[in-house]
Structures are given as structure tokens and as C-alpha cells.
Amino acid sequence: HTQGHDPRRGVGTAAMNRAILDHLHFTMARLPALASRNDWYMALSHAVRDRMLDDWLASLHHFRNKELKVVSYLSAEFLLGPHLGNNLINTGMWDAARDAVESLGLRLEDLLRQEEEPGLGNGGLGRLAACYLDSLATLRIPSIGYGIRYEFGIFDQLIRDGWQVETADKWLKFGNPWEICRSEIAYEVKMGGHTEYHHDADGRLAIVWLPVKVIKGVAYDTPIAGYRSRITGLLRLWKSEAVESFNFQAFNAGEYYHAVDEKVVSESITKVLYPNDEPGVGKLLRLAQQYFFVSCSLQDMIRVHLLRSPRLEEFDQTFAVQMNDTHPSLAVAELMRLLVDEHGLGWDAAWKVTRSTLAYTNHTLLPEALEKWPLQLFANLLPRHLEIVYEINRRFLDEVSRAYPGDQARLARMSLIEETGGKFVRMANLASVGSHAINGVAHLHTELLKETVLADFYQMTPEKFCNVTNGVTPRRWVLLSNPGLAWLISESIGEEWVTAPEKLRELECFASDPSFLSAWRGVKDANKRALAAAILERTGVAVDPESLFDIQVKRIHEYKRQHLNLLHILTLYHRIKRDPGAQIPPRTFIFGGKAAPGYFMAKLIIKLINSVAEVVNADPEVAGRLKVVFFPDFNVTNGQLIYPAADLSEQISTSGKEASGTGNMKFSLNGALTIGTLDGANVEIREEVGEENFFLFGLNATEVQALKKSGYHPGRFYEEDWELREAIDAVRSGLFSHGDAGLFQPLVDHLLYDDEYLALADYRSYLECQERVSTAFRQRELWSVKSVLNVARMGKFSSDRSIREYCEKIWKVPIRPPFPH
Ligand code: 26V
């Protein structure tokens, strides 16, 4: 390219300054004197986007290159977080943009803050997809992320009187400079109706699906910059619209308004993201969302494939398709339908190519989280797909009976259709049967998957199973969010760690260098002061940056045990009140996370956190020693502020319940020490950082199973541990609810009489472990050494490593050498 000569491509300060002013004028139609902060943000973002286009267009061209297999990541969620800062980092334009913005009398920080983050995901699963897009582009692998362009992403969380209140996330309100609407890339998606069988002129059977409704999906493309890789990935999100035939020439007003109603229905498909961790069964609109985006994506892939080759039997050489959980698992039936019904392939040829194209990642073992759709609902929306599912099932169960003659129970368990008490389509079974590879997201999770929910499938086809432990991108989660730490690391060992994080090991020898350790601590302290300022601004609570920042941020769920954390806080509170001389280093407990709107217990836990905070923070007897904060609206943007400021990372789920966790990795990469159970990726983090640098407590997964089997009685733990009793009784007494003893009764009863997640069983072990934390934190120098060693040994958890493993084990995509710098 002609960078440097062509002012539209120049990345120097002067060229950027010019470009921003040009966009303010030609794109935003604003005079500088009258421009709002959003106008400047938009102008800057357009200037940055312009400079991503050469690489992007070159990268898109790769889709036509027969030699290159394209990775297609199908996900109902992409929790991207703000683009601007990340794009400046990855493209290397940060300094020029900052200087250009300053030359205009503005501050880059302010413009970065202006961006509304695209919160198109619930939590870990959606954020993982976003980290993987970053790594795919960084590793120069041609890739497309396919998903849904929700008009409203995950709700914004407000806290009113200690309760969570949800408000609509109007992220598109001021425009989105990062997306390009490709009106000409659009597909029709049928829904409802019935099927008919006809014989054509040659006597061949033709299957016709006569839908009651047809919806159009339009592509919205967003460029995903790789880190200095000159490759820009594609995120293609589908928006639903009414089809062209939308009838404006209706005969009468009634029909006209009916046509308008139809348009509203069509557009409603991609209106809103569902909170996926809400208990309760299938909503029709959610099934429609899943089918809609899967169908658009597969039609798009087939179009791309046909540009390369007319032979659809070779589709698996063009695309490796990863299904992110079961949300896109309709891909199994839809690809069969497209190949057989629309493109005339025989069943066997279609099945062969379907299986070798698709792969399935499982993200949870919780039985209530395994998707299944009521058969009638499925039949009504997708009549043709149900026939296909039946045919897949018939052939599959034949195989099962051949492999296990007479084993009726096994047949019933493996069937794609559940028939015990109400009929359902089991999406995990569909995904498993239709894939050549099935993976879990951490070593322990994969082992448990093979032993529990997918045991029958593992026994029949063990070769399909593998593990790919999750990872996070060090670009967003260190370089962008923790520039102080990134700078200190690069000063010491060079910059290669950003794409070769195993190099972080070289930090180990700095762990004995007092001046390095004090600089390290200086970075942490500055990050803590920044978080303290944000806490004061958003909650009115003043916290001491010198205190131990003990942080638990993640979705609120009983299995994650925020209430166990609370029991520790209550115990410390009582200990200090009983013995004001108690040697307990000052702590600030910080919580953050959203509860699914319909999940009563999770919302009650938020209320309890806020109620405990109210009492503890106002009590002069613990002033300067304990503070409790609920940081509202935990999202990617807030995470970037919070992870770098943590001393202690809370990863305290019941062992065997958290598939992997990825927040655990973000904390540790930013120098926090972990207190955690042997669950998910914690196990591997502890292996890497060393057991002496990890605070372990609690039952392991085997012990959890054994205790449950032998009959767990939480009441006994309550009876036998007076400090636990004191903590629970305080909640029960109304101390935290202005005397209203009933308010937290459901939570207390749940703990005493059920306690599905064994909080009471792990209480004592957790407390003892927290005492070890307190002791360790008093030796600040030693704490910093452990912090450095944590970061030095976290290289494994870069999402680049995860993506390389997917390439090798599942996608069969060659790993390209790093881009020469
Ligand atoms: C769904 C549901 C639905 C019913 C109520 C309970 C419940 C709980 C959780 C979920 C989410 C399942 C899928 C998911 O988000 N899994 C997360 O995936 C992350 C990325 O692999 C992983 O780090 C988290 O441990 C895992 O929970």
C-alpha cells in the first residue's frame, strides 16, 4: 500500500488529525466548535476504521483461496467489549491517535469512555468467543464469527435500594461506527408451516417445506483486528427484517396494517439477547433466534464455498465449523436440509460432509442448563427439521443397538428425543451425533463430561472427545486494561510476551529484585487507587487503596457461591466486634455481577451483599478494617478496570460445577493471587503457578460426589460450628434487613435445608484458607513475589494457545508462522 503518501491511509499524528477533522465534517456534519464528545468519538473511530480497511479487504479475499480452510465460529453470543481502544492497540495506532486527539484539545481517555460496549453476551461463553476472534486474527487464520446482531444486548444493571433493577441496553442509540451493513448479503429463512412430498417429472421424490412465514437476515460486518498481524477477521452478525415482498400495495387498510404487524414480528427475532442462565424451559422466540442465525450463516458459507468449487461434498475442505455450546446445534439438521433438499445431495454424502464439518464445544455440566426443546414447539417452528432429526435418530439408534444389543436403557438415554414425561429434542445429543469432535473447556470439565452427561457418547466414540482448556487474550486483558503492568513487563523482558506469553517466565528472575518488586507493587497500587475512585463515584463508598482488595466478579449464581464469600465477611465482622484487637489486615470486599432477571435467589444474594455492605460500612467498630462494595453493572468495560486492581481473586465454585472459568485467568494474569477450589481451570492454574502461590480450599469433585451420595445434611455443619451459626443467625435475625427477619428467610432456608452447592460443608475450610491469605498479605514483599510468579507462569492461559489447539486437534487448520515484525 501507499501508506505515508496517501493521506487517507497515513497513520502519523498529522494524518490522523486531518482524518478526524475530515470525518467530523464529512461523516458527522459538525463544526468543531459545536461537536459533542460523541461526534469526536465517531470521527476518531471512522478514522481508525478507514485505516483497517486495506488489511481487512485483503483478508476477506482469502475466503476465495482454495488453499485456505476458513474457521467458522458459530455463537449466539459475542461479548466484545469496546472496540476503539482494542483496535488502537492491535493496529499499533494508539500513540498517533492519542497525539492527534490531544492536538485537537481533547483527551483520548474521554473519547474511549464514550463508546457503549456491544454487550452481546451473558458472560464467560460470549466473552470466550470474543477472545477467540482476537486470537484467530492474531494467528492469521482466516475466520468468520457468525452470530446475532441483537438490538438490545445484556441488560444494564442498576442497584435501587440494594436490589437489582434491569434496564434496556440501547447500545446502538448513538450509532455504531464499527459495523458495515451489507444489504446485498441477505438470506431468506423459513419458519413454521408443514412439509409435502411430491414426485417430480423423473419420478424422484421431492420434499417441499411450505412455511407460514419467511424472514430475511441481513449481514452486518465488523472488522476484528489481529495484534500487529496485518490480518483482520470478520464478525458477521445477522439482523432480521421483513422480506421484500412486504406488501405495501395492500387492497385495504386492514391488510396494510396487517402487513406492518408482520414486519414488526419479523424484526422481533433479533431484538433482544436472552439471559441464558435463566432457569425454565424454552421460549419460542429463542428457538427462532437460534434457527435464524444458523440458517443465515450456513447459507452464507455455502455461497462462499460455491465460489470456490461446485462440489458440496468438499464443503468440509472450505469450512471448519465450531458450535459454541448447543445454541447453534440446529446446524446439524439445517446443513443436512440445505444439502439434501436444496442442493440435491444424497443422504449419506450429506451426512458425511455434515459430520466432518461440524464440531461441538460443551460449556456446562449443570443438568438444568442442558438445552432441550419441547417437541411440539420444535415441530411447529421447524417441521422439516423434526423429520430430519427423526431420520438422523433412526439411523443413529440402529448403530447403537448394533453396538449394544438389547440395552434399551442406553437407547433411551442416547436418543435425540427424550420421551420420559413430555417429549423433547435433546440438543446436546444432536450436537454430539452430528459432530466429528466434542470438547470440554478445561481438563477436569472434559473428564467429568466423559463420566457424566456425555458418558454414553464417550463409550461409543471415545476418539471424538478431546479437551481444549479455555484462554483469554493478553491484548485486551493486559495490554489495554493494565498498561502500567504491560509497560513494566516489556521494560524487563521485551515485548514478545504479547504473542508468546511463555516468555513471561523470564519474569521469574525479577521476583528477587527489590526495585522491580517495588515497581510491581507501585503498578498494583495505582490500579487500586483508580478503582477506589470509580467505586466512590458509582457507589459513594470510600475504600482504602492500602487494604487488601478481595474481589469476586462474575454472574451471580448459587453454584459460584457468592454467599460463601458473604459468610466469611460476616465471620470477620463478628470477630472484630468481639475482639477489637484481632490481628486482621484491612480488607475491601468487592462484588460485581448480574443476576438473570427471573432468578429469584440470585437477586436475593445481591440484596444481601448490599445489605451487609450497608451495616458493615456504617459500623464505627470496624471502620478502617472492613468495607463491602457491590460494583454495579459488571461488564467488559468495568472488568478492564477491576481485574488489574485485585489482590485476591475469588474462584470459589463448588468443585465440579464451573466448567472452566475465565475471570480466574484474567485476575491471575494481572497479578492477583487466587483463593479457589479444585474446579474448572483453577486446577490447571494452580498446576502452573505452583501450589505455594495459590490458596486452595474445599472439597474436590470426588469428595463432593461422595458427600452427596452418602446424604448431605447442611444442618449438621450449622449445629457443629458456632461461628457459622453466628453468621447465619445474624442474617436470620433481621440485623441486615432493618429488623425484617423474613427478608432473607428463603436464602437461609435454602442453605440450612438443601444447600445444593455445599457452602456450609466448605465454610470452615474456606475460613482457614482466608486466614492464610491474611497472614500472607502482611508480608507484602513476599506477596509481591507470589504475584510476579503468578504472572510469569500464566502463559498457558493465552487464548492463542487455545486456538492453536483447536487448529491442531479439531479444525485441521495449519498453524501459520507469526507475522514477521
Ligand atoms: C446456563 C444455565 C441455564 C439454566 C440455569 C442454570 C444455568 C447456568 C449456566 C448456564 C450457562 C451455560 C453455558 C456457559 O455460559 N458456560 C460457561 O462457559 C464459560 C466458557 O467456556 C466457562 O468459563 C464457564 O465456566 C461456563 O459456566
Image: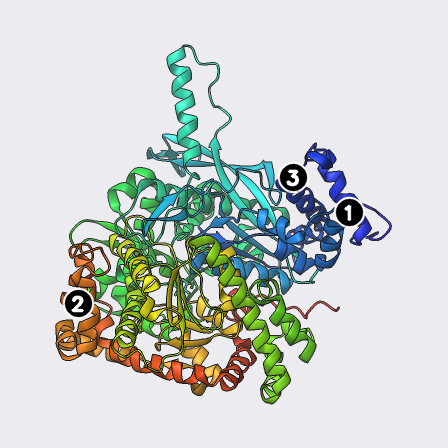
Residue at the spot of label 3? 39
Closer to the camera, 746 or 548?
Answer: 548
186 left or right, relative to 393: right
Give residue 251's position: percent from left, percent from top. Answer: 42, 10
What's the residue type where badge 2 is placed?
Asp
For marks 1 and 2, give the one nearer the viewer: 2
Residue 507's x, y, as percent?
Answer: 61, 82
Secondary structure of residue under mark 2? helix
Q: Residue at x 30, y 52 (%)?
A: 278
Number of marks in picture: 3
| Vertical side of 60 occupied by 188: above or below | above
Ligand 1 resides in the quarter of the picture at: bottom left
> What element does badge 3 sit on?
helix
User: Where is the C terminus found, in terms of image quarters?
Assistant: bottom right
SS category of the residue bearing label 1: helix
Q: Nearer the viewer, mark 3 or mark 2?
A: 2
| Residue identified by numbered label 2 | 729
Q: Amino acid at mark 1?
A: Asn
Q: Who is closer to the viewer here, 513 or 2?
A: 513
**At which x and y percent is residue 628?**
37, 64
Please name whichever residue, 685 or 540, is drawn nearer the observer in this view of the structure: 540
Query: Which residue is label 1 attached to?
Result: 17
Ranked by sequence position, the earlier of labels 3 and 2 is 3
Mark 2, other Cα within 10 Å: few <14 / some 14–19 / many ≥20: some
Q: Quadrant of residue 180?
A: top right
Please rate how many residues cluster around mark 3, counting C-alpha atoms within 10 Å: few if below 14, some from 14 to 19, many from 20. Answer: many
